[in-house]
């Protein structure tokens, strides 16, 4: 490439290979937060922090962190493995162990990753769970996934069945069903594992911060209505 | 044989005719005989049929079109990598074959059956559609109460279709009738486990399946008549291995596959075909509140099944225990392609069988699979190897 060509901007706004990428403060913060989270996970057994595996849709992160659990999301592990081009090996290993070609590759990637040392995206080993929080929020495969993981880890499992909104409406009975499960099944198991009692004020404060974070995220996503848009689809999805 | 006891050929001919009648002539006849009363279809696996019956409606089991229809429009509603039953069910609907049904109940068997409920609402607006969210929490105070409330709501909705709000006595009677039916089906399966040469798997399948469309009292009578006739059969026991077929609880294999497996040197002495008809173990005791009793029975009397959240290590142990109880020589895992519940369960179930020293094979099918040669060879080799080197 000539010196003249190297100075010209690459179409689409991306930087050329000869200049370093400019990250803004939010990107640096995101990187630091993720690195810190995976560092905390890698030292969880030494520090005595409890670890909960759970699912992203309908996740109860505020409740988990109110008990000081460190959450692990197996779907994120599978996504990260995909981005790092390790999925094929993990999936192949799970199929070698008897899992069908027809079933969800997130499950197989996670099973394969687990059998090969459970090394996370930062190259550090992910800790085994103290709790499998089976938030069954709409994907039946989640249910079978955690049945399989319970066999492997032999740890406590808590089921939270969130009813499907077949008519698009939340009924008082659905709300009661979810609240009753939280009170009778999920929270007692968390208290048993951590030795802590639920602090409702701390939970309320976390929920308020989550609500604010969601509003801010929606504001950012809606910025895409502008022309030109300050964000792209990659940002929006990942 | 008594003059009122039909012979086997007559019973089986009727059952096969009912199986092949995709336009549900038996249901049309029922509606003609019961003007104003609704017929409500339900998908696999489990729906409490006695509740539909108690609400004054005729419960009609649906199991797709099998190998009897070609899919033209049904495929347009779905991606390629799911099972076949929703496609053929939509096809039947779009062809008008299900027009005699006033409503449809879709249980929470899996994501496919659940989403089919949504597609049905779009494709057939105006038809009653009910998604039945079977609880995956089995605490009577949470899952039990949620489920009971759901069943009561379903009764109200079916009453509005032309059914009724049943009294406790009427609901109790419905529970009793379906207890009788399940008892008859258990007797049929006991016969197969004891003397499988008297009743082939496809015969038991057809007899059970007839209950999808028949009046429950009439069906119970038919099952009992079949058992009487089968026991009077003059057939010898043959040198075949005894196997269980596991994984075919929702989308059903074609009859040809069942016949092929038995021709390959196996007696299928137990299976999970048409599982919804035999979902509850033992009788439901109606007590003072039969709807609550049916809800409670789901929590405590359900058979082990891949569609129900459970410790799958226990599920595997139950399978191994059942295999030993009925002296099965082996297990054939026969799951519909892309069936998540069945296929994700297979590795732990197979591990349990390995631990118990019970051999197994596995393959996949679709409801319209037309070529069985590979399965014949696989099952035949399985049978031969057990006879040569196993305990059979």
Image (spheres, rainbow, N blue to C red):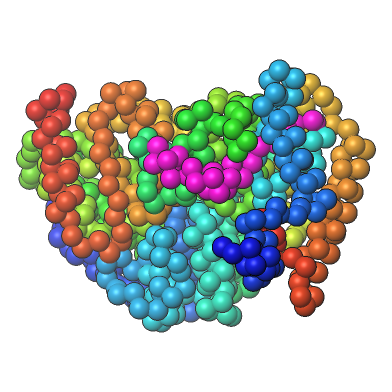
- Which residue does the image show at 33% across and 57% down from the upper left? B252
Q: Residue A131 sits in which quadrant?
A: top right
**A186 to the left or right of B386:** right
Residue B37 on image: x %, y %:
52, 74
| Residue A37 point in image, percent of width and height | 73, 35
In percent of width and height, residue B32 lies at: 42, 79
Task: Please indicate, yes or no, whether residue B365 appears anywhere in the rendered image.
Answer: yes
Viewer-closest of B124 and B71: B71
Rendered-image quadrant of the C terminus of chain A: bottom right
Q: Is residue A75 magenta?
A: yes
A12 over B338 or under it: above or below: below
Q: Magenta part mainly helix, strand or loop? A: helix
Front residue of B260/A99: it is A99
> From this viewpoint, which residue is outermost toward the front?
A3
Q: Which residues are magenta?
A: A67-93
Instruction: Tell me where residue A205 appears, x and y as whole percent.
Output: 91, 43
Residue at horizontal 46%, vertical 69%? B78
């Amino acid at each position: 490439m000539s010196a003249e060509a190297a100075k010209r901007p690459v179409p689409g706004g991306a930087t050329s290979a000869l200049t370093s990428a400019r990250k803004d403060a939010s990107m640096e913060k995101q990187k630091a937060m993720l690195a810190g989270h995976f560092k905390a996970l890698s030292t969880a057994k030494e520090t005595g922090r409890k670890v909960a595996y759970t699912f992203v849709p309908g996740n109860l992160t505020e409740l988990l962190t109110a008990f000081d659990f460190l959450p692990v999301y197996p779907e994120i592990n599978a996504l990260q493995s995909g981005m790092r081009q390790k999925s094929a090996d993990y999936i192949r290993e799970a199929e070698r162990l008897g899992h069908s070609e027809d079933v969800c590759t997130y499950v197989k990637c996670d099973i394969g990753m687990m059998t090969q040392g459970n090394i996370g995206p930062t190259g550090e080993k992910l800790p085994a769970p103290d709790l499998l929080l089976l938030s069954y929020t709409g994907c039946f495969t989640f249910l079978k996934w955690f049945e399989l993981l319970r066999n492997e880890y032999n740890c406590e499992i808590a089921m939270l069945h969130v009813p499907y909104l077949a008519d698009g409406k939340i009924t008082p009975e659905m709300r009661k069903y979810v609240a009753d499960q939280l009170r009778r099944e999920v929270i007692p198991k968390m208290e048993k594992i951590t030795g802590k009692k639920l602090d409702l004020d701390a939970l309320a404060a976390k929920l308020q911060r989550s609500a604010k974070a969601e509003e801010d995220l929606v504001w950012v996503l809606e910025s895409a209505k502008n022309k030109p848009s300050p964000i792209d689809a990659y940002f929006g999805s990942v | 044989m008594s003059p009122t006891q039909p012979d086997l050929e007559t019973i089986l001919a009727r059952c096969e005719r009912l199986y092949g009648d995709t336009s549900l002539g038996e249901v049309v006849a029922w509606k003609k005989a019961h003007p104003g009363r609704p017929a409500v279809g339900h998908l696999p696996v489990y729906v409490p049929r006695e509740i539909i019956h108690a609400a004054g409606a005729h419960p009609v089991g649906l199991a797709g079109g099998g190998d009897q229809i070609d899919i033209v429009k049904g495929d347009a509603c779905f991606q390629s990598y799911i099972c076949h039953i929703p496609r053929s069910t939509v096809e039947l609907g779009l062809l008008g074959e299900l027009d005699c049904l006033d409503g449809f109940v879709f249980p929470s068997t899996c994501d496919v059956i659940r989403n089919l409920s949504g597609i049905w609402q779009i494709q057939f607006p105006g038809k009653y559609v009910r998604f039945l969210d079977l609880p995956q929490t089995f605490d009577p105070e949470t899952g039990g109460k949620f489920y009971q409330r759901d069943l009561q709501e379903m009764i109200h909705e079916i009453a509005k279709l032309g059914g009724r709000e049943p009294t406790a006595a009427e609901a109790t009677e419905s529970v009793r009738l379906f207890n009788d039916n399940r008892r008859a089906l258990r007797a049929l399966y006991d016969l197969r486990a004891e003397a499988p040469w008297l009743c082939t798997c496809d015969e038991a399948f057809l007899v059970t399946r007839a209950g999808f469309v028949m009046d429950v009292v009439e069906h119970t009578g038919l099952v009992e008549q079949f058992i009487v006739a089968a026991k009077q059969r003059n057939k010898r026991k043959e040198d075949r291995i005894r196997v269980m077929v596991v994984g075919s609880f929702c989308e059903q294999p074609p009859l040809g596959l069942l016949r092929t497996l038995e021709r390959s040197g196996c007696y299928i002495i137990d299976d999970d075909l048409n599982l919804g008809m035999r979902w509850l173990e033992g009788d439901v005791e109606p007590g003072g509140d039969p709807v609550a009793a049916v809800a409670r029975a789901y929590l405590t009397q359900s058979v082990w099944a891949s569609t129900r959240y459970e410790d799958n290590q226990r599920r595997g142990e139950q399978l191994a225990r059942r295999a030993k109880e009925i002296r099965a020589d082996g297990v054939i895992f026969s799951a519909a392609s892309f069936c998540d519940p069945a296929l994700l369960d297979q590795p732990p179930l197979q591990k349990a069988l390995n631990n118990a020293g019970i051999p197994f094979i596995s393959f996949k099918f679709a409801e319209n699979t037309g070529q069985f040669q590979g399965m014949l060879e696989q099952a035949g080799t399985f049978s031969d190897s057990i006879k040569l080197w196993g305990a059979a």
